[in-house]
Image (tube, rainbow, N blue to C red):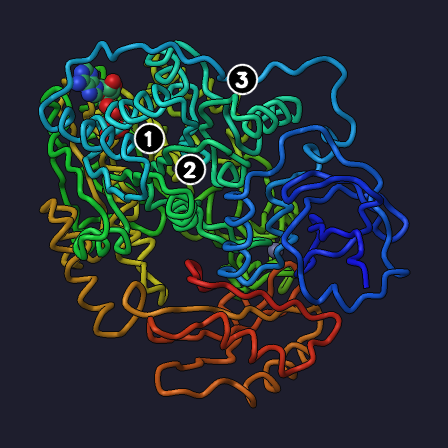
Amino acid sequence: MTKRQSSDVLLPYPVGRPYSYLTDGRAVEKGDFVLVPMGRRETLGVVWEHDAQNDDVPEHKLKAFIESYDIPPMPDIHRRFIAWVAEYTMADIGSVLKMTLPALVENSIRKPPRKQDVYPCTDIPSLKTDLDLSNAQAEAAKEMQKAVSAQTFSAMLLDGVTGSGKTEVYFEALAEAFRQNKQVLVLLPEIGLSPQFLDRFKRRFGTEPAVWHSDVTPANKRKIWHGVLRGETKCVIGARSALFLPFPELGLIIVDEEHDQSYKQEDGVMYNARDMAVVRASLGKMPVALASATPSLETMQNVWAEKYKHLILPDRFGGAEMPDINMIDMREEKTTSQVFLSDPLRQALVETKERGEQSLLFLNRRGYAPLTLCRKCGHRFECPSCSAWLVEHRRTMALHCHHCGFNVKIPKECPECDTEDSLVACGPGVERIAEEAKAFMPDANVLVLSSDITDSPKQMDQALQDIQAGRADVIIGTQMIAKGHHFPKLTTVGVVDADIGLSGGDMRAAERTFQLLHQVSGRAGRSALKGSVYLQSYMPDHTVMKAIANGARDQFLKVEASERAEAAMPPFGKLAALIISGPKEDVVRNYCRQLARVAPNYDNLRVLGPAAAAMSLLRGQHRWRFLIKADKTVHIQKVIEEWVAAVKQPSNIRLKIDIDPQSFF
Ligand code: ADP
Ligand code: ZN
């Protein structure tokens, strides 16, 4: 029997393996981009490893290649990375390929642009930093440069308070990689990709980096993608999806703000870009540096276990001091259900303005009030499609669901008991805090920053410029303002509700609250002016508040770690979640019951649930959950795969598998 002339091609669709196509005498290699028929359509795919299951398909059933393209192949290392991510996250490998081949890129391969593309960030002049690095900075920079030169895998934590010069230090590592003619990837949370940051890059390297995030125009994305594939684009600064660009010559990965939750993708392929960046570095034999002022417990544990090198920048650059932390015990303050700012905080705001400086009030709640109820009958406004209260927004004079976008005009009367003017707003959102601030500081410029108000990068940029130029006295913002920004005149930070993240049973609640409070506090007094932070809390004795007040980060993390070790929770054990959802509750429940009946049952693994999710209704879908908790030695993916294969999944049910879940709602 002559060997048939076929190759296996992976398609960017939810498929679990590549399919065979006849090559028709074409010479194709693994990684080649090819056009093949699929059903009645033609689709782009990538020539992949042969899958033995395809041997059983008779030759006459195979279709033939349509075309192959004259662009560099997808690098082997990138194909291995895709396979690795698919296996770990239990996503279909085709769905992972899709992250590498977004539709706009597919089109540009199928119909190449007529004129030669100009790729961004191809020439980086070998400039030298004009800064005198401090000793700690110089030492950290040297370590990182050494790691880049070694061209083997290593992982580092670049650990320093905000303003300690972490960015300047990793720029030195970038410079070394460019000298070696390597490509570099810098991952940042989406909101960290500010014009300020790009300016700094340009000042240091004399050229603009390629920027990759959801708002980049398709034309730019195409250029970046092809530039990266050709190895010509040297530096990409991007949000998590940039990790799936097909770099052939990657030599260094930086994950800035590595603790940030936005690195976890919660839709589609559920992956953690921070963790997958470490995997990518390890497969490709290069260093990866995680940077943070508030490293995640997982990362610190890797430092303590000496898996990650610890590079410490102990001080703020230029001797700027850390701010004073003032705890305000709200149990002792005379605030009411209509007043949310305590006397000491109000006084600080007034004095700050008198000094000609700026204040930031932080509250992680958009809108005016998180709950509206009828004072006559107690009716609460809830979203018809989600288990969530509707949030009042004064800007739109409507009640909004923050989960599905549903909204209604605020009615005159209660829909339940018909009483007029009986509706009351409960609790504060940023709009309400702005109203309160304006009331006692009538001549202050109050600026509200939240994603519904400053929703375009342009508006955000304008707002940031206003702040820089001193056109705001009091800035009121949600977490979009918490990180990264540097405002020289901002000296006072007030946290309206420091306890907000501590409720609920999330094992990371304390850790995350610590990170957020620390980041927010870090906005105060970043230059010569000393900063002060006011934390309003009903639990001033909570370990998180104590740790913030005493600046005792590592001690706090050690205690958290020992508690997690005791409970065998990550990073000392493994977790995975199954999220089952569907439009009919009884179908969801029934399927869960069937799964429960055949749930794996071992000594080193426990299945918790099924239980209705905290968000038991989301966008009209009923949701139930299982949580799987296992020893580190368990191959949790394999167990889950066998388990869910044992029960037939009803057609209108969605089953999501979340390995290393970060959210538990
Ligand atoms: P981080 O990333 O840790 O928050 P940055 O790298 O942004 O810190 O540094 C904070 C500020 O201090 C920036 O404006 C930076 O340019 C400046 N800076 C840091 N190191 C030096 C240095 N050695 N000489 C002069 N300015 C520095
Ligand atoms: Zn809703």
| Alpha carbons under labels 2 and 3: distance apart | 21 Å
Residue 496 percent across, percent down from the top left: 29, 43
Residue at 19%, 32% in the rendered image: 143
Q: First in sequence: mark 3 or mark 1?
A: 3
**Residue 469, picture quadrant:** top left
Residue 97 percent across, percent down from the top left: 62, 47
Q: Please, what secondary structure does the residue beneath circle 1 have?
A: loop
Crowding around mark 2 (Cα neighbors within 10 Å: few <14, some 14 to 19, many 20+) is many
As drawn, which residue projects farthest toward the front? Answer: 1
Q: Is residue 532 above or below residue 411?
A: above
| Alpha carbons under labels 1 and 2: distance apart | 10 Å
Which residue carries the number 3 mark?
Answer: 120
Disc 1 residue lies near ligand 1 with CB under 8 A: yes
Q: Amino acid at mark 2?
A: Pro
The image quadrant where one finds ligand 2 is bottom right
Asked if labels 2 and 1 touch by Cβ distance under 8 angstroms, the answer is yes
Which residue carries the number 2 mark?
Answer: 189
Disc 2 residue lies near ligand 1 with CB under 8 A: no
The label nearer to you, 3 versus 1, is: 3
Q: Is residue 375 above or below residue 576?
A: above
Q: Looking at the rendered structure, which numbered label has been put on residue 333?
A: none
Which residue carries the number 1 mark?
Answer: 484
Q: First in sequence: mark 1 or mark 2?
A: 2
Q: Nearer the viewer, residue 402 or 272?
A: 272
